[in-house]
Image: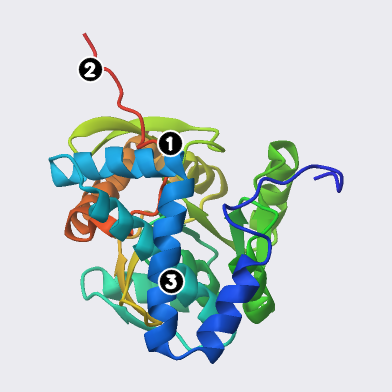
Amino acid sequence: MSPTTTLRRNPGPSWGYGFLLWAERWWPRWVFRPVLMAGTWVALGVMPAQRAYSREYLAVVLGRPAALVEVWRHFFALAEFLMTELRVGRGAPVRCTLAPENEAAFEALVRSDRPALFGSFHFGGSDLLGYLLGERGRRVSIIRLRVGNSGETRLLGERFGRQVSFLWVNDPVNLLFDLKAALEAGDSLALKCDRLEFSAKAEPFDFLGARRQFPFTIYHLAILFERPVVFCTAVAEQGRAELRVFASPVFTPVPAAGREANTQAGRRHFQAVLGQLEALVRQHPYLWFNFIPLNPEVPAAR
């Protein structure tokens, strides 16, 4: 990416991340938490587009119009997780508990030396999982959007930088070369598979009561480079660096089966992954950290 390229920015002032870290460190919790709650109300007032998208999403997942306080809870859940990321970037330990379903297959893959594709979503504590793979001895390239004021990404990159690197989606042309180089070098990839903005391949799947478009690129990469795919989703315990991690079954392409058969198997695998995600979203509706339009519905075929 050209150094003169203007980067988009996260909402908020340029000094916001530094102030939050300073205040959380030096102010007592009984002072800091009400300030964070009040700041969330301010954010709700000055971010009308995100507020509208939150309300639309919550109406779908709750099955009724969302009250303003419920939209605030959605915003505040993101604020609390941002603080968790900042604490981890500053050095706080992270405790992970893996759900027993699919635990054995996931652990076997992580302990192996086989490069893999680790998929996830903008949900709960999932954003931390790519970094934590580095602590398990894996070289991981995390696919991210570079923004101009992402303090948590900078801190987490500094903490986990020995095993973790970034591939930026801002420049799609360079990303293709970077992806190929990382995969051929034996790195694992960690990528989110819910936002369509930078996805080269998308397909419809059942999610939240409709057929909706989702990125499908991870499976095309798996088939092309013969890499296994596993999805991990994490629920962060409120205000603490503790994650309950839910792993999917491992999808392993079979070269002898041919591209079409592997693609069909990938579709079945991803639909099961989205079924697991939907159950978690309905259980924890405020942990869906996408303040953008919900994945678009696909008209039914006639």
The amino acid at mark 3 is Leu
Where's the C terminus, which quadrant? top left
Contact? badges 1 and 3 (CB < 8 Å): no
Q: On the picture, is 62 further left or further right than 163?
A: left
The mark closer to the camera, 2 or 1, is 2
- Can residue 135 be seen here? no
Pointer 1 residue: 258
- Dot 1 alpha-carbon crowd within 10 angstroms: few under 14, some 14 to 19, many 20 or more: few
Q: Please, which residue is most extreme toward the top here?
A: 302
In three-dimensional space, the C-alpha distance between marks 1 and 3, rounded to whole angstroms, equals: 53 Å
The amino acid at mark 2 is Ala
Counting from the top left corner in percent of width and height, residue 147 is at 66, 52
- Dot 3 alpha-carbon crowd within 10 angstroms: few under 14, some 14 to 19, many 20 or more: some
- Ranked by sequence position, the earlier of labels 1 and 3 is 3
Pointer 2 residue: 300
Residue 6: quadrant of the picture:
top right
Pointer 3 residue: 36
Counting from the top left corner in percent of width and height, residue 239 is at 36, 79
Counting from the top left corner in percent of width and height, residue 20 is at 56, 75
Element type where label 3 sits in the image: helix
Vertical comparison of 200 with 150: above or below? above
In the image shown, does 223 or 8 lie closer to the viewer? 8
- Can residue 42 be seen here? yes
In the image shown, does 132 or 127 lie closer to the viewer? 127
